[in-house]
Amino acid sequence: MIERKAAPATQETKSELVFTKKNYQLLLISIAIVVVGFVLMMGTTDIYDVRKTLIAPMVVLFGFGFGVYAILKK
């Protein structure tokens, strides 16, 4: 029969985090940008206002894009 070798009981594990402190800071900034975009969309004024239909969605999309950058940055 085939003899199996047992793996060593003590394996060294690296306690390295996936993201650095800078990644977390950039991710928090991107969340804040998205929140600002949604705040710009709020209000009881004209629904077809330029701020609500153009500026706020662009701010939200920029925040999501910045979040992707924050995740992918090494």
Image: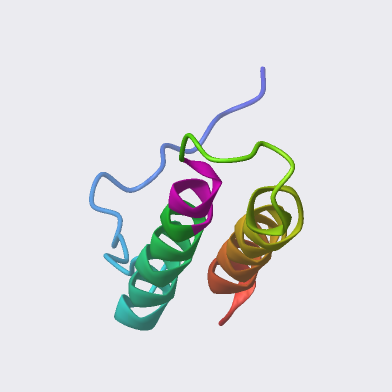
- Asked if the stretch drawn in magenta spans residue 38, the answer is yes
Which of the two residues, 30 or 1, is positioned nearer the viewer here?
30
Q: Residue furthest top?
A: 1
**Image x and y of residue 8, in percent:** 33, 48
Image vertical order of residue 74 relative to residue 30, above or below: below
Image vertical order of residue 50 relative to residue 24, above or below: above
**Would residue 64 be found to the left or right of residue 5 on screen?**
right
Which secondary structure dominates the residues rendered in magenta? helix
Q: Residue at 56% across / 63% down in the picture?
A: 67
Which of the two residues, 61 or 70, is positioned nearer the viewer here?
61
Q: Residue at 74% across / 42% down in the picture?
A: 48
Q: Quadrant of the C terminus?
A: bottom right
Residue 18 visible somewhere in the drawing: no
Q: Quadrant of the N terminus?
A: top right
**Image x and y of residue 43, in percent:** 46, 40
**Image x and y of residue 26, in percent:** 43, 75
- Asked if the stretch drawn in magenta spans residue 72, the answer is no
**Would residue 31 be found to the left or right of residue 60 on screen?**
left
Q: Which of the 4 image quadrants contains residue 21?
A: bottom left
Image vertical order of residue 20 relative to residue 7, above or below: below
Residue 30 visible somewhere in the drawing: yes
Count of numbered circles in the view: 0
Which of the two residues, 52 or 31, is positioned nearer the viewer here?
52
Q: Which residues are magenta?
A: 37-42
**Would residue 8 be found to the left or right of residue 44 on screen?**
left
